[in-house]
Amino acid sequence: MLHMHDLTHTLNVLRHWQSSWLSREIIFGILFAGA
């Protein structure tokens, strides 16, 4: 997640989580950190 420098880019990636491996990485990281 350190390669996501711009918050607006991060939000855009999260919006398209079905087609983006970066958004899946972010979601997995959040879930992994919360467990």
Image: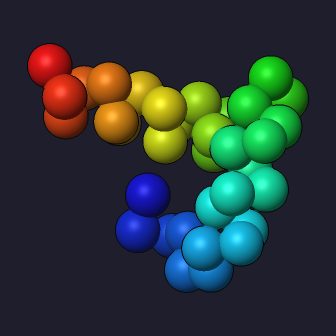
Q: Quadrant of residue 19?
A: top right
Image spot of residue 21 (x, y percent):
68, 35
Q: Is residue 5 left or right of residue 30?
A: right
Image spot of residue 28 (x, y percent):
42, 27
* Viewer-closest of 15 and 3: 15
| Quarter the C terminus occupies | top left
Q: Quadrant of residue 5?
A: bottom right
Image spot of residue 13 (x, y percent):
74, 50
| Quarter the N terminus occupies | bottom left
Q: Is residue 3 left or right of residue 12?
A: left
Please tell me whether residue 20 is drawn above or below residue 9 in the rendered image. above
**Would residue 1 be seen by someone viewing this image from the given angle?**
yes
- Label count reads 0
Q: Quadrant of residue 16?
A: top right
Identify the residue shown where x is 51% and y is 70%: 3
**Would residue 20 be seen by someone viewing this image from the given angle?**
no
Q: Residue furthest left?
A: 35
Colouring mode (rainbow / by chain / secondary structure / one colour) = rainbow
Identify the residue shown where x is 74% and y is 31%: 17
* Viewer-closest of 9 and 22: 9
Image spot of residue 2 (x, y percent):
41, 68
Q: Residue furthest bottom?
A: 5
Identify the residue shown where x is 73% and y is 68%: 9
Q: Is residue 1 left or right of residue 20?
A: left
Please tell me whether residue 10 is drawn above or below residue 21 in the rendered image. below
